[in-house]
Amino acid sequence: MASSNSLTPTSNAPATDRSSTSSQTQTGNGGEQLNERKRALNEVFGLLKLSYHNQFNAAFPDTETLHLAKRLWLESLEAFTPEQIVAGAKRAIKQCEYLPTVHKMLQLCAAGDNGLPDARAAYREACNAPSPKANYHWSHPAVYHAGREANWFFLANNPESTAYPVFAEHYRKLCARVLEGEQLPAPEQLRLEDNPGKPLSKEENAEKMAALRAELDL
């Protein structure tokens, strides 16, 4: 009986140890991932403070507010890797005039390789792109399609206060489609004639000019 009782704890020990080791490993991995995201978020807030100094200090005037904001951002950006979070902050610095909100950071982190510019930057690109618009090298097809749907003539002939909201709404809808995985088609570029006409000679140009003068009685 004694020997039988002595085997019971011995046989259970390895299983208990294995379970404990597995649990500790999982906890350790999760803790390390959390620490990496925290380090990334600290880097992000450092970058934002340098880039949006006055706005940053106004948004986070004390340590308590800053800690609450970091906790909110940590929870809100949980779906993204540390690399994606830092990349989102760098996009904000390049594209955004104002300190990004959590909602904006979600868009910037999700943009990834999609390369979606900020709405204001997209509007300026759409307005400044030369004609023909389809032949311009766009930063993203969404910018072109938003401009086309807003109407190029409307954008060119109205002040920013009127045109931008219209463009931004079209662009917002297109960005949402892109972030859901839709691939927008590239603009269909206009091609020059395959067989352009032969240039006129000097004599032919002179004859054309003489005929035009005679027609206009010049």
Image (cartoon, rainbow, N blue to C red):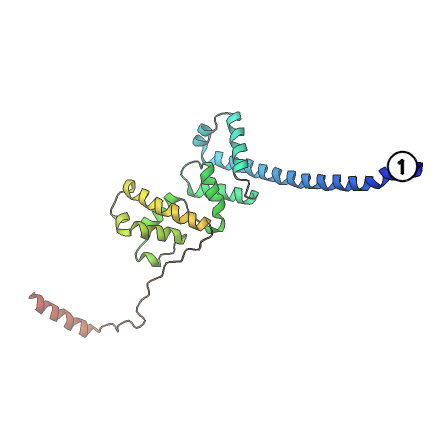
Q: Is residue 149 left or right of residue 50?
A: left
Amino acid identity at mark 1? Asn
The correct choice, above or below, for 112 with respect to 205 in the image is: above
Q: Whole-percent x and y of residue 217?
A: 6, 66
Q: Nearer the viewer, residue 130 or 72?
A: 72
Q: Work out which quarter of the rendered image holds the N terminus and state it.
A: top right
**Residue at image location 42% in from the left, 40% down from the top:** 96
Q: Whole-percent x and y of residue 140?
A: 41, 52
In the rendered image, the residue lying farthest to the right is 2
In the rendered image, the residue lying farthest to the left is 217
Q: Work out which quarter of the rendered image holds the C terminus and state it.
A: bottom left
Q: How many circles with numbers are drawn on the protein?
A: 1
Identify the residue under disc 1: 5
- Quadrant of residue 141 within the rendered picture: bottom left
Q: Is residue 128 visible?
A: no
The correct choice, above or below, for 48 with respect to 116 in the image is: above
Q: Secondary structure at mark 1?
A: helix
The correct choice, above or below, for 46 with respect to 132 in the image is: above
Q: Nearer the viewer, residue 5 or 103?
A: 5
**Residue at image location 47% in from the left, 44% down from the top:** 108
Q: Nearer the viewer, residue 102 or 134?
A: 102
Q: Is residue 55 left or right of residue 30?
A: left
The correct choice, above or below, for 61 with respect to 35 in the image is: above
**Residue at image location 64% in from the left, 40% down from the top:** 30
Q: Whole-percent x and y of residue 107?
A: 46, 43
